[in-house]
Image (tube, grey):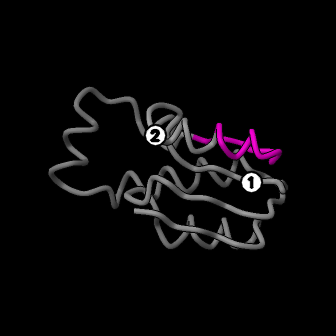
């Protein structure tokens, strides 16, 4: 199965996508924080004000990165960055979308 894993590449997220690979799946990991603007204090700002503006930026950058790729499953671990635009992109490129918050 070809899986898009949208989430961190450290901690429990790393363990999850490593387990998927051990089960024989082809896993592509995209860490949404890599697409966030690199402004000092960005994580703190998102924590206090929400991620609406950042989520739109991440959705556009993720869509460009995925281009014409297709997946059997899109596993979204970083739900705080999920915008309606990103969900539409994932639905267009994956048979199933699993959102975990």
Q: Measured from the top left, where is residue 94 in percent x and y?
A: 75, 67
**Residue 76, position as x, y percentages in the image:** 55, 58
**N-terminal label among 1 and 2:** 1
Q: Residue at x 65, y 37 (%)?
A: 18
Residue 4 is situated, as x and y percent measured from the top left of the image, at 70, 52
The residue at the point 66 percent across, 55 percent down is 63
Q: Which residues are magenta?
A: 18-30
Query: Secondary structure under badge 1?
Result: strand
| Closer to us: 29 or 87 | 29
Is 20 colored magenta in this rendering? yes
Q: Which residue: 59% across, 68% down?
A: 98
Write down the quadrant of residue 52 in the picture.
bottom left
Of 13 and 68, nearer the camera is: 13
Give the left or right position of residue 37, taking residue 70 as reference. left
The answer to whether the residues at label 1 and label 2 have Cβ atoms under 8 Å apart is: no
Q: Is residue 15 above or below residue 50?
A: above
Decide: few, some or many residues near mark 2? Use Cα within 10 Å; few <14, some 14-19, many ≥20.
few
Estimate how packed mark 1 is, as few (under 14), some (14 to 19) or many (20 or more) residues with alpha carbons within 10 Å: many
Q: CA distance from mark 1 to mark 2?
A: 17 Å
The residue lying at 70 percent from left, 46 percent from top is: 20
Q: Residue furthest left?
A: 48
**Quick one: SS at disc 2?**
helix
Residue behind mark 2: 12
* Residue found at the far top of this picture: 40
Residue 62 is covered by the magenta coloring: no
Which quarter of the image is occupied by the N terminus? bottom right
Which residue is denoted by mark 1 in the rendering? 3
Where, quadrant-wise, is the C terminus in this rendering?
bottom left
Please identify, in this view, whether the residue under mark 1 or under mark 2 is nearer the observer.
Answer: 2
Left/right placement of residue 2 relative to residue 98 reads: right
């Amino acid at each position: 199965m070809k899986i898009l894993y949208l989430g961190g590449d450290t901690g429990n997220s790393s363990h999850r996508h490593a387990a998927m690979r051990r089960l024989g799946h082809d896993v592509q990991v995209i860490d949404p924080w890599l697409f966030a603007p690199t402004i000092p204090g960005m994580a703190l700002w998102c924590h206090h004000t929400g991620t609406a503006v950042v989520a739109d930026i991440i959705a556009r950058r993720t869509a460009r990165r995925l281009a014409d790729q297709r997946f059997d499953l899109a596993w979204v671990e970083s739900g705080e960055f999920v915008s309606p635009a990103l969900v539409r992109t994932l639905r267009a490129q994956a048979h199933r979308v699993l959102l975990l918050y």
